[in-house]
Amino acid sequence: MHFKSILYIIAISFFLILTSCEDFFETTLELDPPPFEKTLVIDHLAYTGRDTIDFRISTNAGILENIEIYDLNINDAEVILTVNGQSYVAKINAQASTYYNYAVILPSPLKQGDELSILATHPLYGQASSTFRFLPETDILSAVFYEDGGLDQNGDERSKVSVKFMDKPGKNYYAVQIIAPFFNNQIRPTSVSSLDPAVFESHERYTVLLTDDGFDGKEKILDFQTYRIPEDWAKGNVKLVWYGISEDYYKFSRSLNAHQNTADNPFGTPVPVTTNINGGTGIFAGHTRQVIDVD
Amino acid sequence: MLKKSIILYIIILFCHLLAAQKVTISGYIEDESSGEKLIGCNIYHPSTQSGTVSNTFGFYSITLDRDDVILLEISYIGYSAQSINISGQVSLSYNIKMKSEAVFDEIEITATKDKKIETETQMSMIDVPILQIKKIPALMGETDVLKALQLLPGVQSGGEGQAGLYVRGGSPDQNLILLDGVPVYNANHLFGFFSVFNAEAIKDVTLIKGGFPARYGGRLSSVLEINLKDGHQQEFHGDVSIGLVGSKLTLEGPINKGKTSFLVSGRRTYIDLLAKPFIKQSFKDSGSEGDTGYYFYDLNAKVNHTFSQRDRIYLSVYGGNDKFYFNQKDTEFGNKDFTDNGLGWGNLTGALRWNHVIHDKLFMNTTLTYSKYNLNTAISLGTEYEDKSTDLISLGYLSGIRDYAAKIDFDYVPSPRHFIRFGTNVIFHEFNPGQFNLEQISATNGINFKQTLGQPIKNATEMAMYVEDDFEITKKLKVNVGLHLSGFSVDDAFYTSLQPRFSARYLLPKGIGLKASFATMRQFINLLSFEGIGLPTDLWLPTTARVKPQESWQAAIGVAKTFGKDYEISVEAYYKRMNNLIAYKDGSGLFELSDWQDRITQGKGEAYGFEFFLQKKTGKLSGWIGYTLAWNNRQFSDLNEGRAFPYRYDRRHDLSIVAIYELSKKINVSSTWVYGTGNAVTLPKSRYGAIVSGENLDYSYLTNVEQYGDRNSYRMNAYHRLDIGINFIKTRKNRTRTWSIGAYNAYANNNPFFVYFDTDYLDTGVEKRVLKQVSLFPLIPYVTYSLKF
């Protein structure tokens, strides 16, 4: 057989293959989704100094269910909050302009050392519960603003707040915000980052997280960078918000941040979001809040 | 070292003196017509019921009592058995030439059975004749050694069409793949759909899954030893093959008859060339110029020269590359916007080996090797203005590994009861864990910026020494005991490991071989890989002071028996424990600039199972049935909340049936059927909304959180496939032509490749979320033409 004939047969076969296959070698089938259990979701973050506690009580939906997450709120659950042994029944927060659909108003503001528990019950979705205790406040020794705060990871010029604090012995977790003036004279939380390896992104905007790995029980100075703020703007207007946070919240926030970052990344590994809710999912936590005027 | 050498010399001398009443017959065993050295050829002395086998270079040595005449029986699969009478008064060198049985009978290959499986100490080892591999139907007609090995028990594929090997619960980086003694780091072309090994150039393939002899080390799960042909010593021959995706050409022959021969084999795909006119037209239709395509090529070359009966050298080189390219140019207002992207990866290996027969009982092989694997990605975007000035932004990514190694191995055969091997090696590794090169040139803004980011190149040294003895204690009991000592130096860290190895076989009544083995292994280099994706972007990285070496131990027990004329059956059970396995932490991604050590976590794994293998290598009907029942789990403190979870390739059932039938001397048909439990993957089960607000409720919003079950808790559909093929062979004078026609996935089963969530838009305008399975290769016919001359 001539060489040309062989090539002819090969070429015809090749194109026969290409044209015979749907979507160029690729076909798709619909599959049944993995089974799941419908449970309650508790979403709650309390702060010391507040006397109103808001919750979002919702449920989860099947991965293929065609329902908006905004429509998952549950308004017929019984929610009991216990503060230092005193129980309160949460009420529907119908007037709320936020996503929180339940609230409890306490007789006095929350403070460090308070212990809070929640028990939510629903006839269809069962019970969900959790507990946390507000951590003691941190000894912030100084907080100083510098207009010239060096370059950040992207090589942009930044201002910084240098914080000296005393870490208490034992494993501690913190969250940090910087409040600073904007162009419209509004004073609000602003961008915050750090080159220190102990500092990580939070899922919350304008917030970073840190652990005391490497300086447990010791005095530590950390620099937190923010956008470049002129000295005269900053004067008297920059504040540092320091939160003592729980390990559960730290893990939740880091995992949720990673979950969000990898949501659209085909090469990202799946990140399960951690929870501290027994019998359900979500987060029930509280931050010990300290606001420090920056020099 | 000097002291050890002196002791060794004294031992050898002592043994030599003891053997004064004995004679040693030694030499090479080769194919009569081509001069190709035969590996694992059985030499048997019926009077004493003792024997030996030829080594990787075809060398044998047998020491027997002095006698007037010594009768030896030589057998090798596919060759007619020989009985030779040799004068037994003095030691002598005797080369043996074996006649291929195919010469006598092209229909039925009925070689005298070589060494019976039940008599060998080594367990968990499979060698598949390369001629058999070539007859198995293959994807697009491309004979693939790795895909053929996936059909064996204990060996799994990663997924549809992929060539990676998962051996007894291990990952592909835990396989020591040696091509003529040189490690090959990336054995895949086209994202794993084809392996880099060109079957036309291969002489011999052996896979060891457990009971590792002490001469092997550095990987946890398997040793795959592939030896290239040496090249015909007497005549020029060639083989040209034209297939659907590529063509191959192999040439071999003597440079100096009987002394020097060569082999050159090359392969290139031409999908890019066939599709080029259509692609160019497609760009033209969209108003631009451009081209895109993919190809791979590889080249094997080998030269060997015989200086004397005692000295031979071999030089072998392998080079292969994959290349994907995309470029486009759009002209607007006289300015040309262009983009030029490329992705390339490939291996280059070389080995220079010197065989020296120091003594008729002592064989030495000295090897110098070089191995390099590189990945190179480049993306350029820019504008060329009318005045020829250019704005350009380019991003390049480079990673890889480079090895320089030297080793020396000795085979010492003091008597038929002992086969002692010892040796040492050193490897200098150079790791490039990923570097980004950024460049910006702007004529309009006067910018000329260059920056290199990423991890610095890291050097490491790996070394090893070993000694092993295949020792026949009694006629029934034979053991292989050995020690492998390895060390690894990187930065300021130095790791050592002493790995005991043990295999034994005991002959039970009725010719049943009872076998057991135990081996500990340690691995100092790691492949940082995304499970299942099998991208060339996977990174080879060293053990460091922070990242501990991977280690394992494996115990196996089994029985083996040859029955009937030529059926072999083996049943084995194994348990493997692995520590310091490496995996990405949750959320880590590719192309990150952070230190790779921060992105990984280490944990443990266990794999256990049962394997059944029934093989028939010869006769009109040949093939095998392989079945594996296996469990394969991982546990990392940072993953799955510390709970154990199934490995992605935890495959409970894996069954392969391979049959080749010679209808006549002109036609043979073959068929393969495989079944495997679906891969374990992680999928979200449900979702909920989480508030993101912090303290500032005015910025709050709800984010969608997908809830996962346990890691890898979802099973993809089971995989099953039938391949069929038929070969039409016509022989004329000095040439043989073969038409191979067949089909991959003959009943067009939709096998899972991956699953994903998608949104369908119904006619009613309603959105519907669905879980979809993507399948490749519904039914792929193939046709290949080859001509041997």
Image (spheres, grey):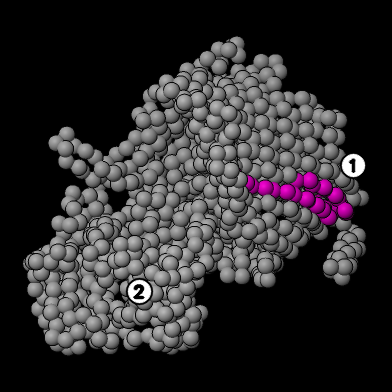
Q: According to the image, label 2 marks what residue?
A: A237
At 64% across and 24% down in the image, what residue appears? B240
Letter of the chain that mark 1 sits on in the rendering: B
Residue at 41 percent of width and 56 percent of height: A269
- Note whether B191 is above or below B220 in the view shown: above
Tell me the quadrant of the picture where the N terminus of chain A can be found. Answer: top right
Residue B638, by quadrant, is: bottom left
Q: Is residue B362 magenta?
A: yes
User: Mark 1 and mark 2 in contact (Cβ < 8 Å)?
Assistant: no
Query: Tag 2: residue type?
Result: Asn
Q: Which residues are magenta?
A: B351-377
Left or right: where does residue B199 sit relative to residue A288? right
Q: Nearer the viewer, residue B511 or B199?
A: B199
Q: Nearer the viewer, mark 2 or mark 1?
A: 2
Say if residue B629 shows up in the picture.
Answer: no
- At 59% from the left and 66% from the top, the residue drawn is B549
Q: Is residue B184 above or below residue A39?
A: above
Magenta stretch mostly in which secondary structure?
Answer: strand
x and y percentages locating residue B660 in the rendered image:
51, 32
Residue at which label 1 appears: B308
Please, is residue B669 above or below residue A200 in the view? Answer: above
Image quadrant in which the C terminus of chain A is located: bottom left
